[in-house]
Amino acid sequence: MLTDKETDVHPKIRQSSNLAAEYYVASILFRLGYVVTVTFGNTKEIDLIVYDPQTHDTVTVDVKGLKNTTNWVMPKNPCQRPDHFYILVTFKNKISDLDSVPEVYTLPSEEVTRLWVPWVRREDVRAIRWSDLRKRSDFKGMEGIKLLFQKQKTLKPT
């Protein structure tokens, strides 16, 4: 098994944090009774299509994985629809530790531009800081997942 230090020098493993995050989120959603379709491709804004069999509603999700606890790089022009969400996953520097539980944050797409900041030394790249997001219990874990099919999204002010 590779350590987290070794994954820094292996680009394929570094890229796999996004794929690991997508499947992790799909697993959570399946466990909650949703029907999930994983989409495939290199440059896409929809990673998961999620269907609620009880309400017959469908939402789309863009998953961003983070091996550490820094920043999630966000798209320049994020999709902003009421039925589109960003789910951000951090493996908290323990991607190889299968006993460690990743942190999951679910953001309605309309919230993304309110939370993003310039990426370090790259004013043209936008990111969401883990250090900011971890203070938002309304987005974290199950509370965040509930936002996917909540008709009236009542969010706490930042």
Image (cartoon, helix red, strand yellow):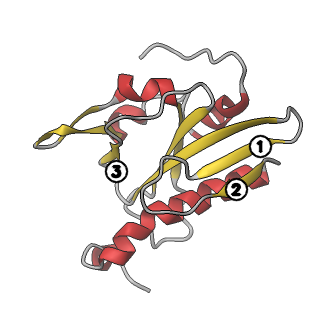
Amino acid type indicated by mark 1: Tyr
Q: Are the residues at dot 2 and dot 1 in contact (C-beta closer than 8 Å)?
A: yes
Image location of residue 45, percent across then percent down: 48, 47
Residue at image location 63% in from the left, 30% down from the top: 83
The numbered disc on residue 86 is none
C-alpha gap between disc 2 and disc 3:
28 Å
Label 3 sits on a secondary structure element that is: loop
Report which residue position mark 2 lands on: 37
Residue 31 or residue 119, whichever sits in front: 119
Give the spatial CA distance, label 3 vs label 1: 30 Å
List the residue tagged with mark 3.
69
Q: Which residue is mark 1?
A: 51
Q: Which x, y percent locates residue 31?
A: 77, 54
Q: Is residue 110 above or below residue 46?
A: above
Q: Kindly identify the amino acid type of the residue bearing the numbered disc 3.
A: Thr
Q: Residue at x 50, y 30 (%)?
A: 109
In this rendered view, identify the residue nearer to me: 101 or 45: 45
Image x and y of residue 87, in percent: 53, 43
Looking at the image, tell me whether mark 3 or mark 1 is earlier in sequence order.
1
SS class, disc 1: strand
